[in-house]
Image (cartoon, rainbow, N blue to C red):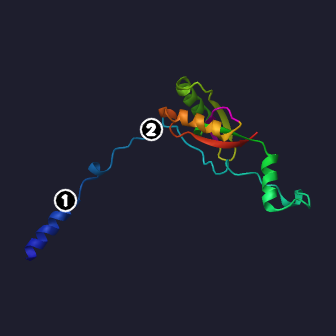
């Protein structure tokens, strides 16, 4: 009985010890990979007006939120990529501009310190979402997303 358990234990140990070359893939450092996306949490936030800048009779919190939204003119755009350097963003545009009829533009985002590639803004989110859905059908733009920007 002890020999059976010993043989089973030994065989388990031998079969579970697989060389790492079979387990992990040989991943070479690829310097050509340049596709990065922004953290959009800072872009999607609304502008907050300090309380001391508001009139005394400004009203309730709900009314204040409505007035702040009305004061800021928002537009919507579709972001298709974000890059650490302007050169990489230009390479992306040169390689992919012929795959879409929408003009691709580069914008620098100071908060993320990335160069984002976007299409020109639209006045409504619905328009931008339609364009995003069309762009997602093409492989270079599959991770495109809509963002809100101040005009």
Residue density around tag 1, few if under 14, some if 14–19, many if 20 or more, within 10 Å: few
User: Is 136 one of the magenta-colored residues?
Assistant: no
Question: Which secondary structure lies at badge 2?
Answer: loop
Alpha carbon distance from label 2 to label 1: 33 Å
Residue 107 on image: x %, y %: 67, 36
Residue at point 47%, 33% (across, down): 139
140 in relation to 114, above or below: above
Residue 45 on image: x %, y %: 69, 51
Between discs 2 and 1, the one toward the N terminus: 1
Residue density around tag 2, few if under 14, some if 14–19, many if 20 or more, within 10 Å: few
Q: Quadrant of residue 30?
A: top left
Q: 103 or 61, which is in the foreground?
A: 61
Residue 4 on image: x %, y %: 9, 71
Q: Which mark is residue 103?
A: none
Q: Which residue is mark 2?
A: 30
Q: Quadrant of the N terminus?
A: bottom left
Residue 55 on image: x %, y %: 91, 58
Q: Quadrant of residue 89?
A: top right
- Residue contact between numbered discs 2 and 1, judged by CB atoms under 8 Å: no
* Range of magenta residues: 114-122
Q: Classify residue 6 as left or right of residue 46.
A: left
Furthest-right residue in this view: 56
Q: Which residue is mark 1?
A: 15
Q: Classify residue 71 as left or right of residue 88.
A: right
Residue at point 81%, 57% (across, down): 63
């Amino acid at each position: 009985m002890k020999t059976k358990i010993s043989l089973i234990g030994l065989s388990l140990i031998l079969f579970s010890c697989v060389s790492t070359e079979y387990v992990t893939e040989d991943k070479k450092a690829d310097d050509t990979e340049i596709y990065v996306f922004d953290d959009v949490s800072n872009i999607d936030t609304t502008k907050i007006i300090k309380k001391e800048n508001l009139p005394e009779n400004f009203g309730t919190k709900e009314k204040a939120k409505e007035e702040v939204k009305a004061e800021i003119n928002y537009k919507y755009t579709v972001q298709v990529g974000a890059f650490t350097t302007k050169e990489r963003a230009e390479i992306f545009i040169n390689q992919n501009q012929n795959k879409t009829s929408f003009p691709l533009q580069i914008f620098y985002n100071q908060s993320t310190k990335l160069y984002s590639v976007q299409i020109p803004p639209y006045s409504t989110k619905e328009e931008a979402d339609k364009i995003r859905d069309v762009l997602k059908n093409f492989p270079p733009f599959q991770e495109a997303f809509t963002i809100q920007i101040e005009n």
